[in-house]
Image: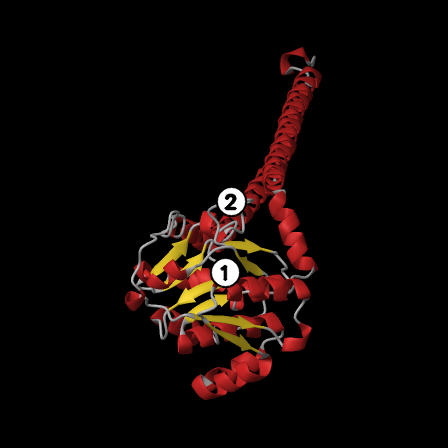
Amino acid sequence: MYFVINNRIRTIVLFLLVLFIVLVGSISWPWFCAAWIWHRSTIEFPLTSLFNHSRMKVPSIIHQTWRDKNSIPLSWQEASNSCRSLHSNYEYRFWTDDNARRLIEKEFPSLLSTYDSYPYDIQRADVIRLIVLYVYGGIYLDFDIICLKSFDQLRSYEFILPKTMPVGLSNDLIVAQPKHPFLLQLLNNLPKMNRNYLTKYATVMFSTGPMYITHEASNYVNRSSIDILSQDLYGKYVHNSTRALFKHLKASSWHGNDAAFVKWMYRRRTAFLSLLVIVFLLTFALIYLVQHYHSNMNFLKEIFLMEKFQFRKSSLNYEKIPSNMISV
């Protein structure tokens, strides 16, 4: 009976381990694939200095969005002015919640129900940038991005996204020609990914943010039309680089406590992974020791019972009187 229970416990533990590995694998595998697909940048330093304006695929329009003109932080206004002064010949379009909604009503009325259902403003901001780029094309920049150099050369590409850390692509800077098919795919799939992922950070990232962009780019049939800006040129994860086109204030204005926790976990990822491995090893070592202890105890118990049985059998043999010893 003990061995049956022991085997059942071992089977349950192994089943739970396999289930855990399958669950972790199913969640992490797409992002390992995305990391591999987008690990190499296609736009590196130095950028080609000679280019023909007549061959530019992206119109000279800078797009930025915020809820209204009066509530933009001063540091963001200065960052925006740095881009506009470096590109004084560009058209500048500022999108508020009101005029962006009117554009959606005109160009993508089927998205209005999804747009209105988002619980967070940042999700609507993520959608607005995709729509204005699909309709007009140009360069979208988050307000916390400072321009250090001209990005004219980037306009010779169809579609550009920067790499982000730890994995995937970012949407704080997008360069796109009008009506690019990838933008249409992103817009068409928004309703399907409009889900609640338990926390604000996860919900935003996977429904409209960088992880959504990365997932869709990884499944896009014409991935070669998407170019990746190197981290040297992007400037977000390098410090004091003379190659960077941009500098980032890293405002992350929409981040909440869950985002801070995720970042805290990521900074200590090696320690947590090591701790997880140690816990698993200790758990299985403990299970093995307990099973080994009970097996030894059971074995000793069986030996004790056998010896006891043999002893009783011998005692009975001694107590039995032989028939030839009985006198008549």
- Residue 272 drawn at (x, y percent): 62, 41
Q: Is residue 193 visible?
A: no
Q: Which residue is mark 2?
A: 241
Q: Which residue is mark 1?
A: 211
Left or right: residue 280 versus residue 133 is: right
Nearer mark to the viewer, of 1 and 2: 2
Q: Quadrant of the N terminus?
A: top right
Q: Quadrant of residue 74?
A: bottom right
Amino acid type shown at disc 2: Ser
In space, the residues marked 1 and 2 are separated at their CA atoms by: 27 Å
Of callouts 1 and 2, the N-terminal one: 1
Amino acid type shown at disc 1: Met
Give whichever of 268, 279 is nearer the camera: 268
Q: Is residue 200 above or below residue 124?
A: above
Residue shown at the point (46%, 88%) measured from the top left:
106
Q: Is residue 281 above or below residue 253?
A: above
Left or right: residue 244 versus residue 199 is: left
Q: Is residue 3 above or below residue 185?
A: above
Mark 1 closeness class: few <14, some 14–19, many ≥20 residues within 10 Å: many
- Residue 14 drawn at (x, y percent): 53, 44
Left or right: residue 194 versus residue 50 is: right
Q: Quadrant of the C terminus?
A: top right
Instruction: Say what secondary structure mark 2 lies in.
Output: loop
Give whichever of 119, 169 is nearer the camera: 169
Mark 2 closeness class: few <14, some 14–19, many ≥20 residues within 10 Å: few
Total numbered labels placed on residues in the image: 2
